[in-house]
Amino acid sequence: MLPARIGESIHPAWDRTASVVAVRLHPALEQATALSRSVASLIAFTLRPIAVAVLACGMWRLGIDLGWTQDFFVSQGLLSHWQVWIAMSLALYFAAGFLSRLTGVSEDS
């Protein structure tokens, strides 16, 4: 048998196998997509309060620099700067908005 004939005889079987696998995997892929959307929606929902808490830490740290408050719980390192806390808060807030838009969940609900 020539190589071209062998390839021609295998190709239809491969097409049938691929279509059967695609039909059987389609419901599983839809379920995984729905689950990932709901998980992303939950993460977006929880990121907003976390962003507010991180912003509060940033304000607390800024208050120490201005002499309004005392004794921040991080005294050294990267997290001892108010700019880092406020930047993290903004990043979390915008990430929550991105995930909300990605999942199609409105911010009012």
Image (cartoon, rainbow, N blue to C red):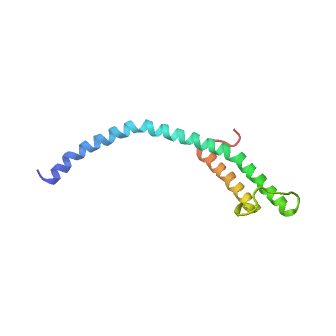
Residue 86 appears at what percent x and percent y? 74, 58
Q: In the rendered view, tell whether residue 95 sits above or below residue 28.
A: below
Does residue 76 appear to the left or right of 13 in the view shown? right
Does residue 72 appear to the left or right of 35 in the view shown? right
The residue under the point 53% across, 39% down is 35
Direction left: furthest residue: 1
- Number of numbered markers: 0
Does residue 60 appear to the left or right of 42 in the view shown? right
In the rendered image, the quadrant that contains the C terminus is top right
The residue under the point 64% across, 52% down is 95
Residue 108 appears at what percent x and percent y? 71, 40
Q: Is residue 104 visible?
A: no
Q: In the rendered view, tell whether residue 66 sits above or below residue 1.
A: below
Residue 73 appears at what percent x and percent y? 77, 55
The residue under the point 47% across, 38% down is 30
Residue 94 appears at what percent x and percent y? 67, 53
Q: Quadrant of residue 76?
A: bottom right
Q: Nearer the viewer, residue 53 or 97?
A: 53
Does residue 33 appear to the left or right of 70 in the view shown? left
The residue under the point 12% across, 53% down is 2
Q: Is residue 46 visible?
A: yes
Q: Nearer the viewer, residue 94 or 46?
A: 46
Q: Nearer the viewer, residue 27 or 92?
A: 92
